[in-house]
Amino acid sequence: MNQQRLLPELKSRFDRDGFVAVDPLFDAEQMAQIRAEVDRFLVEEVPRMPPERVYYEDRADRASIKQLQKLYEYSAFFHRLMFDGPVRQIAETVLGEAVVPQNMQFFNKPAGIGQATPPHQDGYYFHLQPCRAVTGWLALEPVDDENGCIHYLRGSHQSRTFRPHGFTQVLGFSQGMTDFGSEEDRAATVACPGRPGTFLIHDAYTVHWAGANRSATRSRRALGFIYYAVSAGLDQVSKDAYQQRLDERLRIEGRI
Ligand SMILES: O=C(O)CCC(=O)C(=O)O
């Protein structure tokens, strides 16, 4: 993409809708390099990662990885992608200030068994005051309605509030909205199909979700990039209270 020229336009669409797509952000050659590093990472780095950073769709099936955390701590290539590349530049542009990189994730929905991502607002998980943060999302392969592309509620960031969330059974997305699905929600929904290199970025208040992977043959792989604005402060009281609720819940369910 011709970034410099497009940046002001990206910001105005982001401010209006709460998300924006850059299609593509990376060309075929760059995507081949990124995908090669993902493949290497899955073979060489995952076995070295602590279990709490590796989530499986089915723990008995080691090929069913669904989420990995903090990729840049294990790969110089991913460190550059998170800290020095166009992704960070877009995050700083749409937020209008410098950012602090927080997490880089691998998201997969394995063919046939990839679960849906519940409707949620990322900021509900972040515990920031003020909540100024964005999440970028890069498609590593073709994504569409069948294999679980991202859907946004256009304009849902504008209220700067969180809708009610409750516990889900989805590993990696423990919180989902409990009041989602009204006529208004349906009317505001925008599906974001794409190809390798399609990049999305959304505000921490923007409601989004993704369907299950209904394809028997295609996975749905992507990379996620979380950046906090430098002006965002961590609300430690809220974070601790949330962690306590989550731990209690997992204990009751016998999951920890
Ligand atoms: O990849 C997905 O299905 C969900 C990603 C997501 O919700 C996020 O990055 O906030």
Image (cartoon, helix red, strand yellow):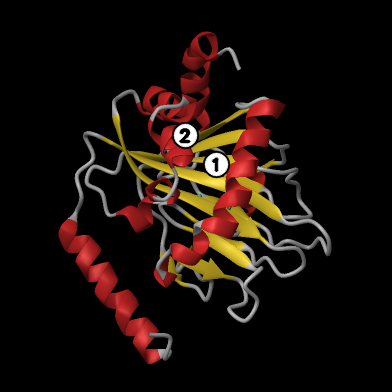
Q: What secondary structure is found at the residue carrying circle 2?
A: helix
- Mark 2, other Cα within 10 Å: few <14 / some 14–19 / many ≥20: some
Indicate whether 227 appears above or below 59: above
- Front position in the image: 26 or 14: 26
Q: Quadrant of residue 205?
A: top left
Residue furthest front in the image: 44
Rendered image: mark on residue 226: none
Q: Residue at x 62, y 77 (%)?
A: 58
Indicate whether 245 appears above or below 211: below
Query: Label 2 vs label 1: CA separation?
Result: 12 Å
Q: Residue at x 50, y 66 (%)?
A: 47
Q: What secondary structure is found at the residue carrying circle 1?
A: strand
Q: Give the residue pinned by disc 2.
A: 81
Question: Which quadrant would the C terminus be assigned to in this image?
Answer: bottom left
List x then y, in percent, for residue 54.
48, 66
Q: Residue at x 41, y 39 (%)?
A: 79
Is 15 positioned to the left or the right of 40 in the image?
left
List x then y, in percent, for residue 84.
40, 27
Q: Is residue 2 visible?
A: yes
Is 167 positioned to the left or the right of 114 in the image?
left
Q: Is mark 1 within 8 Å of ligand 1?
A: yes
Q: Nearer the viewer, mark 2 or mark 1?
A: 2
